[in-house]
Image: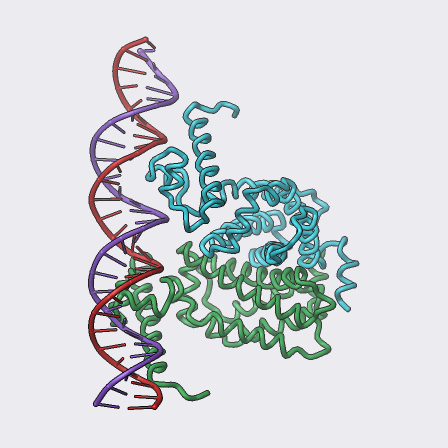
Chain colours: A cyan, B green, C red, D purple
Amino acid sequence: MGVVSLRERKRARTRQAVVDAAVDLFERNGYEGTTVADIAAAAEIGTRTFFSYFPSKEEVLFPEADVRVRAALTAIDNRSPSEGPAEVLVRALREVTAESSEITGPTARLRMRLMREVPAILGRGLQIQLDGQRQIARHLQAAYPDSLDAVSAAALAGALTGAVTGALLALFEDPDRPDDPEELKMAVERATEIALAPWTASADGVREESRA
Amino acid sequence: MGVVSLRERKRARTRQAVVDAAVDLFERNGYEGTTVADIAAAAEIGTRTFFSYFPSKEEVLFPEADVRVRAALTAIDNRSPSEGPAEVLVRALREVTAESSEITGPTARLRMRLMREVPAILGRGLQIQLDGQRQIARHLQAAYPDSLDAVSAAALAGALTGAVTGALLALFEDPDRPDDPEELKMAVERATEIALAPWTASADGVREESRA
DNA sequence: GAGCGTAACTGCATCGAGTGCAACATTGCA
DNA sequence: TGCAATGTTGCACTCGATGCAGTTACGCTC
């Protein structure tokens, strides 16, 4: 496990250098104003080599999207027998949000900004998110084979991620929003309740209130 | 209103020719196997001119995404006073799904297939969908200014569209699915109930059943 | 520690999407 | 008929991305 060859270590180091260089350049010259050649030069690799680390220019902004999904998946797989589908989903979501640096850190902020400004990045981000959603749906269905069919599981997963994504994007749309991590978490909480209110017990208050 | 100059008519005709040519070529040679130059040649225009009709190659597959959104928006704006937010959303969704050719016709089928196969198209599709979702959220919030804030409206709209999109994509994932339009509508219904069950009265049966 | 196979790095040539520009054609209107 | 506006086109160019082939660096065995 802990054994990492020199090759792998070097490669990981270079990869990080590429990310750092890219983030720096994006912040300085904007996304479109930065070419792959620029990034490669700043990271001291050949332009061609860039594409052996990342399959495309956008990808450099989502360097570890998969680890977050994996955390959610294991949270689902390790469900306790008493939990219903929605409870498991909520727990999985918390697992992802736990590393708050993932949605609060400087790279995350840049990513969010660029998703607003550059259509290509938004598209890629949504694509990655959908991919994660699909895997979650699959594992969720596997966890509840006789109370959920594939379509329902997909709808449930889609409702939650759609609500959270919608809420977060709405939050970031406000240009002079106070940069408060707590507010982010609150928005996620609210979105979760809105999406899953009927399936969890905790949100009855909100449900009754908004029914009026 | 009905007055259309010769210029406009000609332009509309050419635009349709481009779409037809593109769809035909995509079906024959695949998306990646078709260049913009091919499409332009088939539509008998210069390659450069293609980009005066569509800003990018992908766009040709979403030629009237905006009219569907507009239908949903007016459905929201014309809400009856007795309706709650969720009821309005459901009605807006039905408005969009009404033109079933929009999700059943041959172009729609091609679009769905290419969204599965070509990442760039999926990305663009999600982007367009998110854009519509945003507008819907804005109008929804405008319709219920004191029971919905911007974030909640966005979460609600996101939950619905996320659930529907997730369900439809799950449905299309099955390779040997019977090509039944009714099944599509059923999936949409189910997704709607899953996402909005707490906010509408009609779905209580499903809710109770799935709570078990 | 010398040598060998494999994996990584790199430059080069190439393709396709997309843009700015300037010349030219067509339409709308006086 | 003539003029202004709008649409069309070719050309040159940039940039992202890929295939290929030559070189370099690593890791493992003897």
Across and down, in percent, residue A160 comes to: 63, 55
Across and down, in percent, residue D27 comes to: 39, 21
Q: Residue at x 33, y 63 (%)?
A: B26
Along the viewing direction, whichever of A63 and B175 lies nearer the viewer:
A63
Across and down, in percent, residue D13 comes to: 27, 53
- Is residue A190 at least partly visible in the picture? yes
Q: Residue at x 43, y 72 (%)?
A: B105
Q: Name the image quarter holding residue A44.
A: top left
- Is residue A166 at least partly visible in the picture? no
Q: Is A80 left, or right, of D4 in this rendering?
A: right
Note whether A43 is above or below C16 in the view shown. above
Note whether A51 is above or below B176 in the view shown. above
| Number of residue marks | 0
Q: Is A35 left, or right, of A188 in this rendering?
A: left
Which quarter of the rendered picture does the C terminus of chain B lie within?
Answer: bottom right
Q: Is A113 left, or right, of A195 in this rendering?
A: left
Note whether D25 is above or below A46 in the view shown. above
Across and down, in percent, residue A165 comes to: 59, 55
Along the viewing direction, whichever of A74 and B91 lies nearer the viewer:
B91
Q: Residue at x 41, y 49 (%)?
A: A33
